[in-house]
Amino acid sequence: MTGSLMEDVTDLASVSGEKNGSKRFLDSLLSDARRVSCIIIPHSRPTIDKNDINAVTKVLASGMIAQGEKVKEFEDAVSRFVGTKYAVAVSSGTSALHLALLGLGVGPKDEVLMPSYVCSSPYFAATQTGAVPKIVDIDLKDLNVDAAAAKRLVSSKTKTVVVPHMFGNPAQIEDLLALGVPLIEDCAQSLGAKYRKREVGSFGEASVFSFYATKMITTGEGGMILTNKRDVFERVQDLRDYDKKLLKPVKYNYKMTDFQAALGLSQLEKLQKFIERREKIASTYSESFSDCKCEIPDMTPEKSSAFYRYVIMLDKLTTVQERSKQNGVMCERPVNMPLHKYLPSFKCPHSERAFKRALSIPIYPSLTEDEIEYVVVSLRQALRNDKMT
């Protein structure tokens, strides 16, 4: 443990003892340096309990482990939660986006607008259809696609706009709907988030979800397409698997299994508690970092974030990231590489700025109170050193 971290623990112990009743843990850091040196807090981890394990075990014991009734039950549960008529469960978020594009009739030479500051999934899904990705800059206020920038790229060839709700924070849906182009909401990080008290995923022509290991809820791997359009639903459902069907159009093997769906159903029951826990952690972080040299998330009244990520903006990102790592707290860039980095014909200065300054710190339901306190101590120390360099 460095001397500066010890000093910050001392400073924070007196404050936290009054505000959060956490002096016991912080005192233990002071008295046991070995404990601190062994702490590793991962950037992400799944939240699995005995009920989840029992749900999966029950399905495995039944012998029906492929796509079956549990998948249908999971589809119905998610569509009810979000507020759409139809749902199709698939093998991943990327396969969900691929089928959603096909369901909307996207094909060769069509243009698909998508933000630069996002993972590569929308790009791969669009190119799999033969479409042409058009890369849009973001709004730095919420790190979501900028509707004004998208408007400048809309053409007669534009078939759809992929709208990720980044880090659980809803995009400006009303401005994007005003473009007059069908939207596919990418809710991979935002199940449970709301825009004007309405669930995200219920606004677009279609929406897609991911249930990867560390998403809002998990099925290990998995995804889902939601829509209110019956023709889109029927097309997507037909494309999901190829067994006992004609060879044309091309079909895929994108099915989810019943034991995955059983895990998803068990997780969905806990989603609201997961979100409440994330909100509580985010509130602690916002209070703790309010006097630090960084920008913390700023929510607008019409949005209710799911806080999939807690992203701060700072100037010396790599320095703070490395110092946090040395203290056992794994912080990451929330987007590995913006799309405009691969496609230099698109100029996205806001995405470039976010890439250079955005840092995601651990936030997930299974974080303990002790771990949260330690994240705060570590980050405050790293940010304080940042002021001195």
Image (spheres, grey):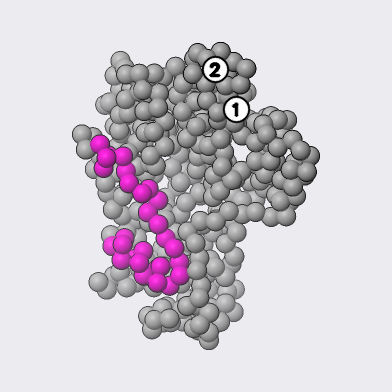
Q: Residue at 26% across / 46% down in the picture?
A: 352
Q: Residue at x 53, y 37 (%)?
A: 92
Image quadrant where residue 341 sits: top left
Could you tell me residue 27's position as x and y percent? 54, 82
Q: Quadrant of the N terminus?
A: bottom left
Front residue of 86/313: it is 86
Residue 166: percent from left, percent from top: 43, 42
Mark 1 Cα shell of 10 Å, populated few (<14), some (14-19), many (≥20): many
Would you name the residue on which mark 2 appears?
235
Residue at horizontal 70 percent and vertical 37 percent from the top: 65
How many numbered dots are placed on residues in this image? 2
| Image disc number at residue 182 | none
Quarter holding residue 151: top left
Mark 1: secondary structure: strand
Residue 137 seen in the figure: yes
Residue for point 49% across, 25% down: 100
Check disc 1 and report the residue beneath it. Answer: 88
Q: Secondary structure at mark 2?
A: helix
Pick whichever, 179 or 101, lies toward us.
Answer: 101
- The percent position of residue 326, horizontal first and vertical second, equals 40, 72
The answer to whether residue 303 is visible is no
- Would you say 300 lies left or right of 372 here? left
Amino acid type of the residue that numbered disc 2 sits on in the rendered structure: Arg
Comes first in the chain, label 1 or label 2: 1
**Kind of residue at badge 1:** Val
Whether 70 is among the magenta residues is no
Residue 77 versus residue 291 in the image, above or below: above
Measured from the top left, where is residue 79 in percent x and y? 63, 30
Q: Which residues are magenta?
A: 316-343
Distance between the Cα atoms at labels 1 and 2? 10 Å
* Left or right of residue 363: residue 289: left
